[in-house]
Image: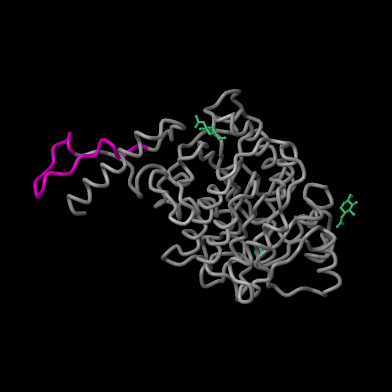
């Protein structure tokens, strides 16, 4: 890097660091003390610094500080937004591997640095608003019993959201951004959000509707098998966790069984459908408008199955469907949802074993997660408001 650029960056970052007095981003070190290296010469120890670089440290999401949020300890460092991993993939119908999704997304997020996250489309840095974000690590989930694993995950969610947030004048309840895991994990999240936020409007980005009849998907072999990544939204509806009138799917394109069986049931579960090819007719703006019109002012939970992207942009997923959106389109749509009250979110179905050497899927998923944090801080909302 040219010395003058280095100087400029150091100056710029120290200026930002001075302006922001709260919240502290613990563990994220500022660049303020960096000095330009002596030109051509070996630098002395005082001149070099061990500040944040994309490759350093232990890998948390976006280098956020790790907090043991769901430890048994009564008091842990407070936070407003908690990232949590859900290493679970025994609810999948096709290729497994999403249990390594949290690990993959964190790896894909290594170039995300909170102090360098000013978004040129939204005009703000999601990490330097009112909320303090941390990474809680992964929930310990058993790999031998799905229903027990979902209970473990639900318990972790509840412990995390029951702690008092940092900036209580914005919101007393911390919000959770979950990294999946196959899509079944969203059920555990919704079983927890209802406690603090009531019935939520689900904005579901996916190529599949995921409201399939629990006793049809997988052949209805047992009640145990009925809980899986193609049925969790049906179950969430039956359990009264989600709005039956203002939820919406976006990016749908996977073939259905029959129109009657699948679409009628889907509408009964409360969903409107934006199909993948609708973007060719109404564009990104039209998609944003349809989602906003549907969801309105209510509390929204956004769940992003990475297979909403075309397999060209996200090959590393369990049930890829050709003909999806590009990464740019998806990011434009998500950033365009500013103004909605987003109280929780997840990115799921990232299955790193199928990624390419360029980590295309994991990098995209990390970026989607950063945009979701942007929506969470865009509108502070109090619980049960
Ligand atoms: C807390 O959040 C509110 C927004 O609701 C913001 O105006 C305020 O600056 C935040 N407090 C701190 C100390 O950042
Ligand atoms: C949603 O649920 C309420 C209460 O159970 C019911 O009155 C209403 O008809 C339902 N709406 C739809 C679209 O099914
Ligand atoms: Mn899907």
- The tally of labels here is 0
Relative to residue 362, is residue 56 drawn left or right? left
Residue at figure coordinates x 58%, y 64% from the top left: 317
Q: Is residue 17 above or below residue 112?
A: above
Q: Main secondary structure of the magenta part?
A: loop
In which image quadrant can residue 184 be found? Answer: bottom right
Q: Which x, y percent locates residue 314?
A: 53, 66
Residue at figure coordinates x 70%, y 57% from the top left: 91
Image quarter of the C terminus: top right
Q: Nearer the viewer, residue 7 or 367?
A: 7
Relative to residue 247, is residue 374 drawn left or right? left
Q: Is residue 272 above or below residue 112?
A: below
Residue at figure coordinates x 21%, y 54% from the top left: 1
Q: Is residue 218 above or below residue 255?
A: above
Q: Which x, y percent locates residue 334?
A: 57, 57
Residue located farthest toward the left when viewing the structure as drawn: 41
First to last magenta residue range: 29-47
Q: Is residue 350 above or below residue 379?
A: below
């Amino acid at each position: 890097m040219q010395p003058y650029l280095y100087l400029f960056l150091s100056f710029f970052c120290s200026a930002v660091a001075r302006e922001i007095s709260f919240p502290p981003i613990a563990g994220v070190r500022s660049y303020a003390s960096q000095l330009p290296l002596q030109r051509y010469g070996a630098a002395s120890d005082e001149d070099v610094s061990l500040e944040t670089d994309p490759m350093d440290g232990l890998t948390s999401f976006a280098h956020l500080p790790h907090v043991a949020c769901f430890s048994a300890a009564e008091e842990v460092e407070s936070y407003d937004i908690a990232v949590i991993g859900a290493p679970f993939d025994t609810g999948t119908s096709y290729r497994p591997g999403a249990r390594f999704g949290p690990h993959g997304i964190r790896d894909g997020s290594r170039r995300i640095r909170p102090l360098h996250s000013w978004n040129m489309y939204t005009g703000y840095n999601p990490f330097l608003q009112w909320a303090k974000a941390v990474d809680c690590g992964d929930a310990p989930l058993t790999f031998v019993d799905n229903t027990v694993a979902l209970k473990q995950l639900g318990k972790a969610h509840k412990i995390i959201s029951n702690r008092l947030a940092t900036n209580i004048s914005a919101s007393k309840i911390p919000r959770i951004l979950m990294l999946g895991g196959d899509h079944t994990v969203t059920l555990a999240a919704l079983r927890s959000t209802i406690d603090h936020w009531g019935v939520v409007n689900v904005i579901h980005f996916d190529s599949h509707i995921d409201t399939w009849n629990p006793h049809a998907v997988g052949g209805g072999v047992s009640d145990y098998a009925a809980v899986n990544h193609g049925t969790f939204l049906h179950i969430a509806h039956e359990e009264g966790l989600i709005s039956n009138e203002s939820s919406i799917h976006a990016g749908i394109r996977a073939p259905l069984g029959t129109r009657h069986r699948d679409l009628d049931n889907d509408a009964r579960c409360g969903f409107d459908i934006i199909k993948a090819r609708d973007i060719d007719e109404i564009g990104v703006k039209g998609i944003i408008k349809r989602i906003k019109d549907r969801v309105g002012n209510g509390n929204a939970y956004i769940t992003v199955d990475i297979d909403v992207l075309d397999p060209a942009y996200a090959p590393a997923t369990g049930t890829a469907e050709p003909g999806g959106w590009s990464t740019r389109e998806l990011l434009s749509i998500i950033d365009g949802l500013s103004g909605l009250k987003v109280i929780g979110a997840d990115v799921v179905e990232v299955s790193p074993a199928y990624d390419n050497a360029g980590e295309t899927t994991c990098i995209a998923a990390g970026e989607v997660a950063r945009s979701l944090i942007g929506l969470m801080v865009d509108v502070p909302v109090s619980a049960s408001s």
